[in-house]
Image: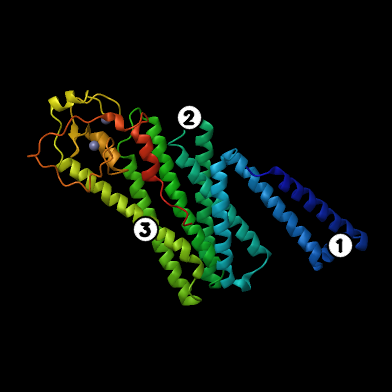
Amino acid sequence: MPAPMPVGGLTMASFAFTAAVIGNAYYQKRQFYPSVVYITKSNPSMAAIYLLAFTLVILLGKLLKKVFFGSLRAAEFEHLVERSFYAVTETCLAFTVFRDDFSPKFVALFTVLLFLKAFHWLADYRVDFMERSPVITLLFHTRVSSLLLLLSLLDLVLVNHAYHSTITRGASVQLVFGFEYAILLTVAFNIAVKYICHTVDLQSQNPWENKAMYLLYTELIMGLFKVLLYIAFLLIMIRIHTFPLFIIRPMYLTLRSFKRAFNDVVLSRRAISNMNTLYPDATPEELTAVDNVCIICREEMLTGAKKLPCGHIFHASCLRSWFQRQQTCPTCRMDILRQSPPDPSTPHPSTPTTTTTSGSAPTTTASATGTTTDTKSL
Ligand SMILES: [Zn+2]
Ligand SMILES: [Zn+2]
């Protein structure tokens, strides 16, 4: 957790410093207006004012964090620090291209961007955590839904502002801001879809079979949007300035996660179609041999059970949602896409033992692997 001491100390120091600056100015000039002029003309005095402004922004950020997230988990804080480090270095690199625009207003805009990014990341962690969290309170829903609404609105307004500024006043640093906010908008949309899917899933009695599929496709479409945004930004930057070195790392990560989302969709579709066309329905005798229990949902199998090439039997509907996340047998972990189609002439394999999987429900172990995609590419 972040130590409260440095911020407290910084706040006190910057308030004291600013008070001293104002006191000194008034002592020298004795009147309001000349004092203001005196302060704005003096670099050390302005530095004190900026420091105070910066401190107030940090305090506001902490307050908003408290309002929307409460306290952060240790893992969330670690992720935040790591990603902030990359975001700051990359954005600083980006702004070297537009160094003529450097001004206090610019520093303020940059700080706002960084804060908004951090809030997108935190919202993403919180929504991902929904699947593993035992209880989702009303407070959680209120916080997440209002935050997502607020973030999307801010992203939209800022993209719009950057667009109009670029159209009317020509290419400036607003181009970088506009691009960054467009990327954040896709992130906010992706989080919103995930949040809605998890909420629907939590409300229903039975696990939602196709949730993973919806999440996969959202990931894929948003990944495509991001790739297109990166390409457009790259082309614009090359035309008006120079090759933007600073987007190489995030662009590479975006391409990689898009490729991964694409592979996930292809593999899960192939596994499901294999199941529908190649794998036989389990016969009543086979079902009695395995105690009739499907280890995915732990319920009895009466009809609609499929036998995998390894001989293990599960509900077809359970296998379907399982294959959306990974393409292995839930019991023996055999890669079902590597396996050649079952040969009917081979003798029936020995009765499978379900003890190879530990007591934890397989669906929960799968959820972490299939749906978390690398979103560090912001
Ligand atoms: Zn089942
Ligand atoms: Zn198996």
The structure residue drawn at horizontal position 46% and vertical position 75%, both measured from the top left corner, is 238
Q: Which residue is mark 2?
A: 135
Disc marking residue 266: none
Q: Quadrant of the N terminus?
A: top right
Q: Secondary structure at mark 2?
A: loop
Query: In terms of sequence position, does the residue under pointer 1 or pointer 3 come before the other?
Result: 1
Report whether 253 appears left or right of 339. Answer: right
C-alpha gap between disc 1 and disc 3: 55 Å
- Coloring scheme used: rainbow
Q: Percent x, y for residue 330?
A: 28, 36
Q: Nearer the viewer, residue 48 or 145?
A: 48
C-alpha gap between disc 2 and disc 1: 57 Å
Q: Quadrant of residue 354?
A: top left
Q: Secondary structure at mark 3?
A: helix
Ligand 1 shows up in which quadrant of the image? top left
Camera sees residue 296: no
Q: Quadrant of residue 197?
A: top left
Q: Amino acid at mark 3?
A: Leu
Q: Which residue is mark 1?
A: 35
C-alpha gap between disc 3 and disc 2: 34 Å
Q: Amino acid at mark 2?
A: Val
Q: Percent x, y for residue 202?
A: 40, 32
Are discs 3 and 2 less than 8 Å apart at CB?
no
Q: Residues within 10 Å of mark 3 (few under 14, many from 20)?
A: some
Q: Residues within 10 Å of mark 2 (few under 14, many from 20)?
A: few
Tally of numbered tags: 3
Q: Which residue is mark 3?
A: 224
Q: Tell me: is circle 1 under 8 Å from ligand 1.
A: no
Q: Percent x, y for residue 225?
A: 39, 58
Q: Nearer the viewer, residue 337 or 319?
A: 337
